[in-house]
Amino acid sequence: MMKKAAAAILALAVTTGMFAGCYGGGSSTSSGEESHASSEGNTEGKIDTSKEVNLVMYLYGSEGVANQSILKELNSKLKEKINATLEIKYIDWGNISTKYPLLWASGEEFDMSYVASNASVPYATLAKQDVLADITDMLDKYAPTLKTAINDSAWNSMKVGGRIYGVPSTYSEFTAYGFVTRKDILEKAGLEKVSSIEDMEKYMDAALSAGFVPLNGSSNLAMDLYRMFIATTSDWLDAPGIPESEMYLAFSASNGGKIFHPAFTDEFEKFAAKMAQWSEKGYWSKDVLSAAQDDKDNFYNGLSAAYITHQPDWTGSYGLQLQKGLDVETEFYTFAEANNKIVKKMGCENATGISVNSKYPERCLMLIEQLMTDKECYDLFQYGIEGVQYKIVDGKITKPDGFDEKTQGGGFAGWALRTDALNIPSVTEDPRRYTLNEAWNKVAIDNPFVGFSFDNKNVSAELSSIANVDSQLGIQILLGKTSDAADSVSKYREQLKTAGVDTVVDEVNKQYEAFKAQ
Amino acid sequence: MVKIKSALKSFAREICRNKILFLMILPALIYFIIFAYIPMPGAYVAFVDYHLNKGIFRSEFVGLKNFEFLTKTGELWRITKNTFLYNSVFILLGNLVQVFMAIMISEIACRWFKKLSQSVILLPYFISMVIVGFFAYNIFNYNNGFLNSLLVSLGFEKHDFYADQEIWKYIIVFFKIWSSTGYGMIIYLAVITGIDEEIYEAAALDGALRFQRILYITLPMLKSTVILLILFGLGGILKGNFDLFYNLIGNNSVLYSQTDIIDTFVFRSLVGSFNFSQGAAVGFYQSIFGLVLILTVNAIVKKIEPDNALF
């Protein structure tokens, strides 16, 4: 009898994990509404900062060894100026997709957090579900400098239902996608630079004969090719509705200003045929769908002749290239440049929000103002302590001599608080970032969707089904993995229809019309 | 009233008598209360339109809307079937191999060899599936995979394993058995070592050969444990081995028709959007399915072998 019992207990212990797994959903009821009270009632002219407060901010990343000492330095400044101290909590890179939603769902008491329109819980969702403090009426009183330092279009991009729930970054970035090439193969191909899809083909043919796999990537390559397709086709722009990680919708002003799904166009058929041809030619490896290394890693290790990414990633990888010792110059072909479609970044793509659970929203706002407009605080927060984490040589940030990563390394993922006014270029960035940014600043067009946020409440089932279609047939078409391109396009269209793509497109257009009519 | 009182009384006496045994089971009880019973009402999240600030119980009730995405493209049947079949094979073949291995090891007389082989079989259990995915890629990839290099050097054509739908079900089952055998085997070994030596000695005296002793003593003694473990396994039959499938197949959609299980399907559908409710809806479906299945099978076991039924 005892033996049987012992065996049963052992067995129980083994299977416990299996059963426990089912209830992972978590049951947390937030109690946000009670702490809704902000200090709006305080109408006296002078701001009362007599009470010292400690404010908690959530950022991505993990704590570097020197973070505490940087923070100590920063806090002595902040305490002097606004009688507040900052405490940073971290969401580790690997856990963002799970911890970030839980941060908001758990009703945890914290003060500020990184928010973004493409975070795992988008900014607009947070604002609509009342977990962010409405700061519209607080700006004039508590952060007048900040209010003027950030231009109106950036503030407008933060508006949800006409109200502002976060402070946008004003750091100019153009996340325009492009094709990164090597100088030596460009010469082999007899090209000055790549400036069209045809040039890309010439370049990749030359790369093939030089023994390279031209785009030696993983399945991520599929979405890069899709971005290339949208960016190089007439006046199409990225549109909201379907998440960016899938085959998203497009917008065309010449097409009556409507949002549509690109898969239902003739251009898509041609593109699918082209991708099948590229795959056939061996522009990417045969088992690209299962490959683990992406094209960028392979490029800097000399295993891929090109890769597709956006401009800040390319220019920001200059340091990586130096580190890897890839001794060849790189060039960049911007897909959207030829059709004049470089789009200005919206502020809400990187911003800082204040939690409704914060007891001191007004003090948070003052702190954000300090971090974004005060030179001393800005430098400490973005770069660390001068002479320890960085020094400035020829107007560029570089590591001081004798810098030891093990004892002095650190810093914060504070991109959401960067501003053009106070930014200092870094030696690990390709200087072409700034020349390109300057050139694009002149020609860049406004995003037609500034201030528009799509509410997917009514179409969530459709979106999940579409995601699934995209991950199967969609990805296969993009990487030319189907036996008959034309046939699979018509199949893909059929599947999209069954998944309810029309409902989604109608809903987006309806909401967008309503938004424009406002 | 009197009945309840006397029942309570006898229960209290039972506790008093077996204090130590109840104390030993206490941690497991607490574990299940905290991690299984208290969160159970949270399953309600599968039926609401989850609102961050309102929480689970004050969000709007939407009925079965969160389940819609599973049926929308008509894939529910395919993924349910795949999950069910894969797990059936894992449970049945897995237990078979475990019993077989446990008997083999228990029959080894040489002590150090016994320990060594047991450790070697157990080791794969501790290897992360991410690493296993890399193993597989290095064995099967087209350009310079181990198998393809071997094929070429033997004068055969290269084979594109990552486009071949047929073979992956075997590869997956192989890796699953490879990684789980050692761990499951321990339970059977424990039961075998618990079998009274005298029975074997008596059988030997009567002239039973080693094979006969296994067939007529060890196997029947293991029967109740096998049934118990299979019943436990059935409860989770729709819970896929996400890490195994995701790391071996990943985004390779060419292979999905044979390798897609509920968990990978849900991961792909929801990874781009934030939706607790749809995720919970799937968990709810899997649990209900498991519950119904385990009740049915238990009822059948009860009919045939009343002693071995779970409850």
Image (cartoon, rainbow, N blue to C red):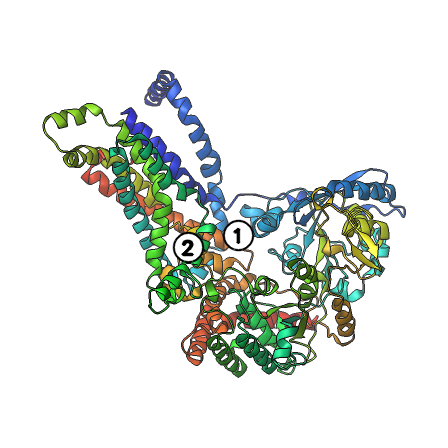
In this rendering, the answer to whether A231 lies above or below B164 is below
Amino acid at circle 2: Phe
Residue placed most toward the observer, A166 or A331: A331
Q: Earlier in the sequence, mark 1 or mark 2?
A: 2
Q: Is residue B290 above or below residue B224?
A: below
Q: How far across and down, in percent of the image, does residue B282 sit? A: 44, 53
Residue B276: image tag: 1
> Extreme right residue here?
A46
Look at the image and tell me in which quarter the N terminus of chain A lies: top left
The quarter of the displayed image where residue A312 is located: bottom right
Which mark, by number, is residue B235?
none
Badge 2: chain ID:
B
Q: Residue at x 42, y 40 (%)?
A: A17
Name the spot of residue A140 as percent of width and height, x first: 84, 55
From what the image shows, is residue B216 above or below residue A67?
Answer: above
Across and down, in percent, residue B231 comes to 30, 41
How many marks on residues?
2
- What residue is pinned by disc 2? B245
> Does residue B49 appear to the left or right of B126 in the view shown?
right
**Contact check, label 1 and label 2, Cβ < 8 Å:** no
Q: Amino acid at mark 1?
A: Phe
SS assignment at label 1: helix
Give the quadrant of the C terminus of chain A: bottom right
Q: Secondary structure at mark 2?
A: helix
Q: Position of residue A293 (x, y in %)?
A: 53, 60
